[in-house]
Amino acid sequence: MRGELHDRRRRQGPRELERLAEELTGRDLAILGQVSDLKLMSTRQIEAVHFPVIEHDTQAAARRSCQRGLARLHRDGLLLRMERRVGGVRMGSAAFVYGLGPTGHRVLRREGPKPRYHEPTAWFLEHTLGISQLVVDITLAARDGQVDVLTCQPEPRCWRPFWTAGGLLVLRPDLFLALGVGDYERRVFVELDRGHESLPSLLRKCRQYQAYYQSGKEQAEHGVFPLVCWSVPTATRADRLRRAISRESRLTDELFRVMITEDMPAALWREAL
């Protein structure tokens, strides 16, 4: 992959970059922008958001159009295709996972340092695609009129620096969402747990949220502190985390909600959490 990237960067001078940018469609730019924000997206996730079946004759036609579009963006170095796949090689091109390529970064003119191009670990892939899937689910629900997405901030845009007696700390949620639910705005920090970390590790993250809550910074800037919603893989783990939070005397229990991953999307726009 490194040699391939090196060759593409060497070939694409300013004129070639300008030509590529002019050929991009609105959908191309939307795909590049979302992949850049979320870091990784699978073929199926990109298809669901950017190639809805309503715009094609059949689901198969939507899938073919998606695969052709992604192949072109990958060919031009705008997207990177990871070696790790979702669902195994038998899934074919539907199993591919994409990140923003070096040319994509230049075309989008993203601020900040250029991203590093290396193969993600299995843990990072699973966790990042889990957040991407939540964003996809909420996006599709918004299209159906079930909820309004007012703000969607993946990492690092959702990070919150704040001062404590011990110095400057940075709270690093996995995702921040502001959702329009009926006549109300619901603000939530999302933490995705895939079952790989110990409960003490999760409680340490809860204590970071508690410290940020006690700093008063979020309330001063926005008038309210978001709910901290934990997404966990099983009911057993959800029960264990709820009990651990309730037993932790230093935590404000009302700040936290714990739910199973498959229930998380719809739960975020219910009237009562």
Image (cartoon, grey):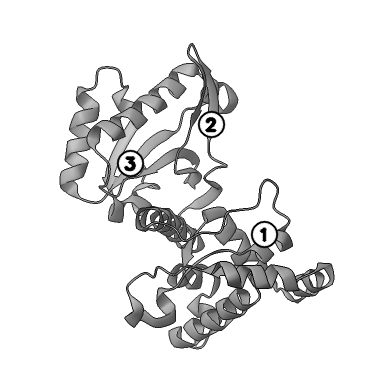
Residues at marks 1 and 2, CA–CA distance in whole angstroms:
25 Å
Q: Which residue is mark 1?
A: 105
Q: Name the residue at 36% across, 31% down.
A: 205
Residue 130: image quadrant is bottom left
In the rendered image of this protein, does residue 239 appear above or below residue 116? above
Q: Which residue is mark 2?
A: 160
The numbered mark, 3 or 1, whose residue comes first in the sequence reads 1
Quick one: label 1, few (<14), some, or many (20+) residues within 10 Å?
A: many
Q: Identify the disc placed on residue 44.
A: none
Please indicate whether residue 243 sits to the left or right of residue 62 in the image: left
Name which residue type carries label 2. Arg
The numbered mark, 1 or 2, whose residue comes first in the sequence reads 1
Which is closer to the viewer, label 3 or label 1?
A: 1
Name which residue type carries label 3. Trp
Quadrant of the frame with the N terminus: bottom right
Percent position of residue 136, x then y: 46, 60
In the rendered image of this protein, does residue 254 appear above or below residue 50? above
Do the residues under discs 3 and 2 have CB atoms within 8 angstroms?
A: no
Quick one: label 3, few (<14), some, or many (20+) residues within 10 Å?
A: many
